[in-house]
Image (tube, rainbow, N blue to C red):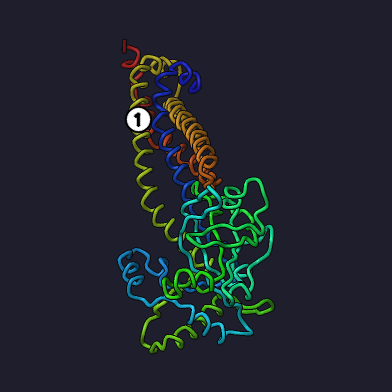
Amino acid sequence: MALEAIVANRLRSILTVIGIVIGIAVVTLVAALLEGAQGFISNTASSLKGGVVQVEKASFQDFIGDGQAFVEAQAKRPDITIEELEILRSRLEGQFEVGAEVSAALPVQRANKTLNGVGIRGVTANAATLTSIKIERGRELTDFDDRYRRSVCIIGADVDEYLFPDRDPIGQMIKVGTAEYQVIGVAEPLGSSFGASQDAFVQLPLGTFAKVFGSRSRSVSLLVRAKDGSEMTTEDVEDRVRFEMRLIRKLEPQEDDDFSFVTSKSVEAFAGRIAGVVAVVLYPLTAIGLIVGGIVVMNMMLASVTERTREIGIRLAIGARRSDILAQFLIESTMLTLAGGAIGIAVAAILVWTAAGLTGFPLSIPIWAVAAAFFVSTTVGLVFGVVPARRASKLNPIDALRKE
């Protein structure tokens, strides 16, 4: 009977569930975006291989909620230099793999083709063992290239595709800024995120980068991990590097570190904290939409009770119990909100699928969000259906039969 009443009043039923559809769709989209953001940051963090500790001049993870302190740290802290890299490498030699990278942005040219905004990275020869970048063709950079500041480079997949669409780039020359370099390798594609490619880069030997940009032009990022076969954890590596860096910089015991650490675990933990903060703000806001949708359901059901007063009176007169009338209207409101929840999830799934295809952002609807959407839909139907259902069940049969 509840289903027949819903079908018989199609327009009213559609208007009733629109608010629920929008509310559930928004909540599901928020869940998908938060999950996607965490997945993206996890993927980004994976550029650091497991067990690798990165030492930065200042890391945003150390200044959560205090952007001004982060800016001040970037301005006041001393740069990490190539000289410090060499000292650290000599002190950790044998037990640890120590490398570094530094970046800038320049246009890259070949013949009449120019690719702007390319990330130019100066790296040590062991960067391949400290990051997730792998060589697809050609060879890796060597200590010989770094020591003698050779004009050689490794290019990303985008640079290869744009500048060398019809030939093998190995052995060819490209211009980075105003200097020419020979391509010795092509990196495996990394894909894109947020619609932006991660393959528009050129790697130079760190010594060559320093020759072009100046050895003290910008702060270097240090990369350290325990050598294969070691049982040291990431935390152990971090503690040892902290000890050595404080000695190198002659910091007193009471002085704070003037450098920061980044690891894949710390980046993921930071992402989890940020997602938690965003969730605390967004979910209550989206809940307001569900409450509004619930109020719409209640008002439409109250209007339905008023329209069907005579029908209710007849049912009561021929023996229906008040609990039967209560159950009928609760079932109606719950079926309407469940239908709204299912449609809302379907709408969110279409939007998520479209956005993921267009941007390359790792979006997906988590299973818990689907379960939560159906639970919330049912709860809204029951809670906001109680008032009209109780009003219907308490109608006096005689008064209801007199209703025109």
Residue 216: image quadrant is: bottom left
Q: Is residue 93 above or below residue 22?
A: below
Binning the other alpha carbons within 10 Å of mark 1 as few (below 14), some (14 to 19) or many (20 upward) gives some
**Secondary-structure class at tag 1:** helix
Q: Residue at x 43, y 72 (%)?
A: 219
Residue 3 screen position, x and y as percent: 50, 22
Q: Residue at x 49, y 33 (%)?
A: 347
Residue 226 screen position, x and y as percent: 61, 78
Looking at the image, the residue that sits furthest to the top is: 404
Looking at the image, the residue that sits furthest to the front is: 111
Instruction: From the image, tell me which residue sits under label 1.
Output: 296
Q: Is residue 131 above or below residue 114?
A: below
Q: Is residue 292 left or right of residue 243?
A: left
Q: Is residue 373 left or right of residue 256?
A: right
Depth check, front residue: 97 or 27: 97
Depth check, front residue: 310 or 192: 192
Figure label count: 1
Residue 389 screen position, x and y as percent: 39, 28
Which quadrant is the C terminus positioned in?
Answer: top left
Depth check, front residue: 76 or 121: 121
Q: Is residue 127 above or below residue 289?
A: below
- Dot 1 amino acid type: Val
Residue 76 screen position, x and y as percent: 33, 75
Q: Residue at x 49, y 48 (%)?
A: 194
Depth check, front residue: 173 or 225: 173
Residue 391: image quadrant is: top left
